[in-house]
Image (tube, rainbow, N blue to C red):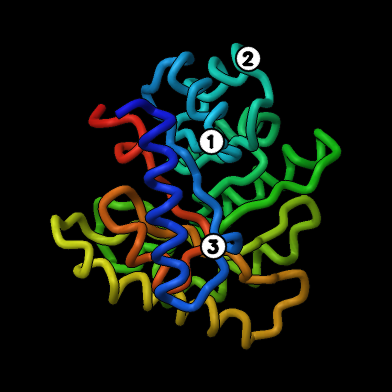
Amino acid sequence: MSVAENFKAVQNRLAAAARRAGRDPSAIRLVTVTKTVDLDRIREAAAAGASVLGENRVQEAKEKIEALGRIASWHLIGHLQTNKAKYAVKLFDLIHSVDNLVLAMEIDKQAAKNGKVQDVLIEVSIAGEAAKAGVSIGDTVRLVREAAGLKHIRVLGLMTMPPLSNDPEDSRPYFRKLRDLAHAVRKEGIAGISMNELSMGMSGDFEVAIEEGATLVRVGTAIFGER
């Protein structure tokens, strides 16, 4: 199948999962993950309707955005090093991967220099895996509260990656935990914090993520094939 056909199939699966959960499919955004994907295939995805493109690395994204322009909204979904924040705020509409205050403060500083308010998500290590980035569940409210005091970033919600598994159902409890954590943060009533976005679910488990409340699903392999 072509990229366009794969994209349409993923859209159909997304809509079906939303309907199973009693949700409006338009409430869920498909982030088309373009890591290592060549420009022609990215153009094909955009022509098929991909309105959000997700990149893992700042430098790769910079080269692609310079070549392609703003053919879609660009999101950073991978780990962000503090020294790359000055580039990230120029390139991305949403940064999914803020997991510490030092990084949040640097993004705030660089966004101020660029005269913008940078939308971000707080990345949570929902399973507590040492090898994965993310703030712990127990420290999430504190980080959100601290980030809320910064004038040039806006926290829109949370992001996570569950442990790898071949069974999508294995991800469900982790997605549920993130949804519950977002509710807990919302109850804190922190000024300027919406918690309306949940970025969770990838090619292997995005339908389960939608059933558990995802508003952003990050899909690459199901659209472009194996890397």
**Circle 2 or circle 3, nearest the eye:** 3
Q: Residue furthest left?
A: 166
C-alpha span from label 1 to label 2: 14 Å
Q: Amino acid at mark 1?
A: Leu
Q: Secondary structure at mark 2?
A: helix
Count of marks overlaid on the render: 3
- Quadrant for the N terminus, please: top left
x and y, in percent, of residue 35 in the image:
40, 29
* In the foreground, 192 or 109: 192
Q: Say which mark, if any, is on residue 87.
A: none
| Residue position marked by numbered label 1 in the rendering | 53
Task: Choose the circle earlier in sequence order: 3 or 1.
Answer: 3
Q: Amino acid at mark 2?
A: Glu
Q: Is residue 222 left or right of residue 167?
A: right
C-alpha span from label 2 to label 3: 32 Å
Q: Amino acid at mark 3?
A: Pro
Q: Secondary structure at mark 1?
A: strand
Quick check: can you spot residue 197?
yes
* In the foreground, 161 or 145: 161
Q: Say which mark, if any, is on residue 25.
A: 3
Within 10 Å of the Cα at label 1, are there few (<14), some (14-19), or many (20+) other Cα atoms?
many
At x 26% / y 27%, what residue is drawn?
Answer: 227
x and y, in percent, of residue 222 in the image:
31, 40
